[in-house]
Image: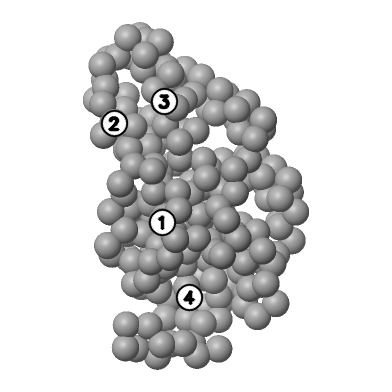
Amino acid sequence: MTYLMQGEQFQVKAILFDLDGTIIDTEPLAASVVRFFLKKWKIKHNSGDLREVVGKTWKVAIHEHYKRFQFPVSERAVLSSMLERYQELLKKKITLIPGAVRAVRLLSHQFTLGLVSGSNSEEVHWILKKLNIKKYFSVILCAEDYNHSKPSPAGYLKAMRLLGVNPGETLIFEDSEAGIKSGTRSGAWVVAVSHANHFGQDQSLAHVKIKNFL
């Protein structure tokens, strides 16, 4: 199907989705977990430090925090503690981006879909099964499936290779600054979803911006 974006025509064959902040709204939850442990360990921080978590794998985000702050426990213990609390809270309630689940279902009738997430495999597959949309994705890549976290384009480029499409035939839905950079660096067309942009992430590099999927 051919579309016009920023004055250029392109044919969409595949659509790739981010998960956190694009299909589900988890960014405030992740930030609250980081805030909880920084306070617990009496580490001074500001909102900018919490913003650094958005769009990256937990491993990368915690590694960056570990270099910046003096933690009383090992980096592995920090990651384990934060992930455990985050997953406990997530299983109590999943907040959806308006219209996202319906959009996935409808778009799957016309396009090949893939998902590229910075979350771990167990968490991603649990969420997709819970939302009953796992079957709509031909490719699902999680933090363990590619070597470099967003903003590297590695995850999106791998998804395109697996789907047999090139960047010019691919549309990506993202929300975070790191994710949008990842998408644009891959050479694909990127749509920014602003509904869950709670921390003022720069979405200016996206080709198009939408509030949600309604």
The local secondary structure at tag 2 comes to: helix
Answer with mark 2 or mark 3, whichever residue precedes in sequence: 3
In this picture, is 183 found above or below 122?
below
Between the C-alphas of marks 2 and 4, the distance is 34 Å
Q: Residues within 10 Å of mark 3 (few under 14, many from 20)?
A: many
The local secondary structure at tag 3 comes to: helix
Q: Which residue is mark 3?
A: 34
Q: Which residue is mark 4?
A: 170
- Residue 18: % across, % down: 50, 56
The local secondary structure at tag 4 comes to: strand
Between the C-alphas of marks 4 and 3, the distance is 34 Å
Colour scheme of the picture: one colour
In the picture, the quarter occupied by the C terminus is bottom right
Answer with mark 4 or mark 1, whichever residue precedes in sequence: 4
Q: Tell me whether circle 3 and circle 1 mark residues in contact (CB < 8 Å).
A: no
Between the C-alphas of marks 1 and 2, the distance is 19 Å
In this picture, is 96 found above or below 187?
above
In this picture, is 169 found above or below 89?
below
Q: Which residue is mark 2?
A: 47
Answer with mark 1 or mark 2, whichever residue precedes in sequence: 2
- Is 159 in front, or is 54? 54
Q: Tell me whether circle 4 and circle 1 mark residues in contact (CB < 8 Å).
A: no
